[in-house]
Image: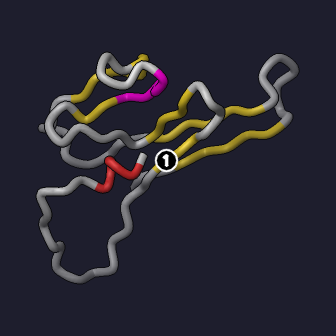
Amino acid sequence: MCLIIVAYKVHPEYPLLIAANRDESYQRPTRQAEFWDNEPSILAGQDLEKGGSWLGMNKFGSVAAVTNYRSGEKLKLSNTSRGLLV
């Protein structure tokens, strides 16, 4: 199960904490959270096969995250990753 966790004003030094996990497609290589070479304003982990991320932010203050949703229907595979939304 994918999770996105937000903690607000629970730590004296860090007023906002955000965490997310990536729990699917383990065989796909990833890169740890760092500023991207091709987009230096983005700080995020990266799916090295499809190019997206599951959690990221930019130097302008925007934060984005995605999680999965399973409805029980057969998955429709696409060449486009929802991680590109981030």
- Which residue lies at the image location 33% right of the left edge and 48% below the top edge? 83
The crowd level at tag 1 (other Cα within 10 Å; few <14, some 14-19, many 20+) is: some
- Which residue lies at the image location 75% right of the left edge and 33% below the top edge? 16
Question: Where is the C terminus found, in terms of image quarters?
Answer: top left
Q: Is residue 50 covered in magenta?
A: no
> In the rendered image of this protein, does residue 48 appear above or below residue 7?
above
Q: Main secondary structure of the magenta part?
A: strand
Q: Secondary structure at mark 1?
A: strand
Indicate left or right for 1 with 73 as reference. Answer: right
Q: Position of residue 34 (x, y in %)?
A: 42, 17
> In the rendered image of this protein, does residue 83 appear above or below residue 57?
below
> In the rendered image of this protein, does residue 22 appear above or below residue 74?
above
Q: Position of residue 26 (x, y in %)?
A: 19, 39
> In the rendered image of this protein, does residue 74 appear above or below residue 10?
below
Indicate left or right for 14 with 84 as reference. Answer: right
Q: Which residues are magenta?
A: 41-45
Indicate left or right for 83 with 7 as reference. Answer: left
The total number of labels drawn is 1
- Which residue lies at the image location 42% right of the left edge and 52% below the top edge? 2
Question: Where is the N terminus found, in terms of image quarters?
Answer: bottom left
Q: Position of residue 77 (x, y in %)?
A: 12, 66
Give the amino acid at mark 1. Answer: Ala
* The image quarter in which residue 51 lies: top left
Q: 54 or 27: which is nearer to us?
A: 54
Q: Which residue is mark 1?
A: 65
- Which residue lies at the image location 65% right of the left edge and 33% below the top edge? 61
* The image quarter in which residue 11 lies: top right
The scheme the figure's colours follow is secondary structure
Q: 54 or 2: which is nearer to us?
A: 54
